[in-house]
Image (tube, grey):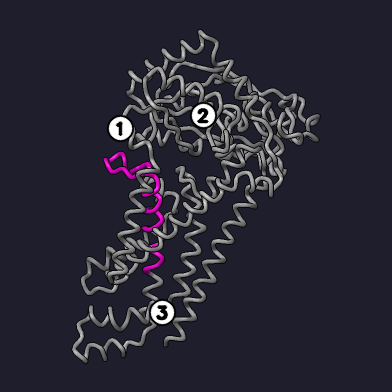
Amino acid sequence: MKRISALLACLLTVLLIAGCSGSPTEQSTNSKKLVLGTSADYPPYEFHKKINGTDEIVGFDIEIAKELAKDMGAELVIEDMKFDSLLLALNSGKIDIAMAAMNPTEERKKNVDFTSIYYTSDQAVLVRADDKDKFKTMADLEGKNIGAQKSTIYEDIARSIPNAKVDALSKMSDILLSLESKRVDALIVELPVAESYEKNRPTLAIAEAHPTSEDNGYAIAVKKGREELVGQLNKSIDRLLSEDKVKKYVTDATKLAEEGDTNIWSLFTQYKSTFLKGVLWTLLLSLVTVVFGFILGVILVLMRRSRIKPLKWIAVAYIEFLRGTPLMVQLFIIYFGLPSIGIEFPKFIAGAIALSLNSAAYLAEIFRAGIESVDKGQLEAARSLGMKQSMAMRYIILPQALKQVLPAIGNEFVVIIKESSIVSLIGITDIMFQEEVVRGSTYAGLPPLIIAAVLYFILTFTCSKLLGVAERRLKTSD
């Protein structure tokens, strides 16, 4: 019991430290900080780059944001997340501003405010180099498979093409992979982004077809009602435009977005520390989830088997609801939804809570199956010897039940390691998050995914073997 208490104390301490270190947004309320939300897979606007051996988010949006923070006398804090999560994070107070080559469309203006336009760009059609001559006009795209970033004007342009089948994804690196793997025929993107990819990937080219849109300017999104912040940002934007600094930032960022090595071994060697950091966060998150999911699962199964009807109903409702709703929805409700009612968790703790609550529902059912596999006569024998119901469950039934379901618990742990990849959606730097970082900064398509798959396999295979050893030892102790 003392060992279990010590383990829980250690995990709570780690959870607290990880939570505090994992979310600068919460700290911004206590000091002068400007928290920028962006989707850093969009060179030359914003992308990851190794600078002196350290991974940094760079790009001309980032340079502009640094000037904005400087004018406000604030420290710039950057939060990297998927593009379609930016406005959600903005309205939930997770970030102060959103900059990610965002067009101030009328639809978006209903939910957030925008600054004045700080950059204007044309659109382009990016295709495989071999197909460049196939798309000379926009009419050539009719009936084709078109890729675009989700919730952008480029998705709207793609959907306006007659009979086109649109594949809208959140990450630019995923969309690019779709083009290279021939799942789509062309991409609709901004001209600077297309030029950057054409320069760094010889397999890609810009087609002659030229899409047009009335919304071709980019602005900074701010939560509705923050007129003072919008005024401050507009003053800085006016200064940068009058000093012609934005053009300089675009030129510098385009030069910085140079080609990386796409050899799989070279990639792993170069970004070894990045991937290992992802492995550590994945393991920590999985361990925390298993421990707290296990404890909550035991409580739930005891509630479900209780003679007190309300406790049983609560447990059944909890298990059915958590098993009947997607984990991603649960994660978004905890991370983005709860702040609206004054409950706010750092991103790591939010991820751990979502995974633990979800896992507990499945573990409770595993425990129930284990308990029901124990002969009822043993409980009756324990009661006939004078044991109370709780004592009989603790010393007679549960130890046998846990031994019966150990393989299923081990399988659940393996599932958690794999399902934890979903927390990359809110910016937790697990293996999948780091894979996207490497893919976005090196223009490499498949190699980072293969490295991530190998790392997940090593973790799950090792875990399965260790659990097999534990299972055999328990059998020999019978």
- In the image, residue 39 sits, relative to residue 403, either above or below, namely above
**Is residue 351 within the magenta segment?**
yes
**Is residue 22 within the magenta segment?**
no
Q: Tell whether label 3 touches label 2 (CB within 8 Å).
A: no
**What is the C-alpha distance between the residues marked 2 and 3?**
52 Å
> Can you tell which quarter of the image residue 30 is in?
top left
- In-image side of 45 versus 476 (left or right): right
Residue range in magenta is 336-364
Foreground tag (3 vs 1): 1
The amino acid on which the numbered mark 2 sits, given as a three-letter code, is: Ala
Q: Tell whether label 1 touches label 3 (CB within 8 Å).
A: no
State the mark number for residue 29.
1
Location of residue 13 in the rendering, given as x and y in whole percent from the top left corner: 32, 54
Q: In the rendered view of the protein, which quadrant contains the C terminus?
A: bottom left
The amino acid on which the numbered mark 1 sits, given as a three-letter code, is: Thr
**What is the C-alpha distance between the residues marked 1 and 2?**
23 Å
The amino acid on which the numbered mark 3 sits, given as a three-letter code, is: Lys
State the mark number for residue 41.
none
* Residue at point 30%, 64% (across, down): 6
Foreground tag (1 vs 2): 1
- In-image side of 306 versus 374 (left or right): left
Location of residue 438 in the rendering, given as x and y in whole percent from the top left corner: 60, 42
**What is the C-alpha distance between the residues marked 3 and 1?**
48 Å
| Crowding near the residue tagged with mark 1, few <14, some 14–19, many ≥20 C-alpha atoms within 10 Å | few
State the mark number for residue 100.
2
State the mark number for residue 403.
3
> Can you tell which quarter of the image residue 150 is in?
top right
- In the image, residue 398 sits, relative to residue 62, either above or below, namely below
Location of residue 422 in the rendering, given as x and y in whole percent from the top left corner: 49, 50
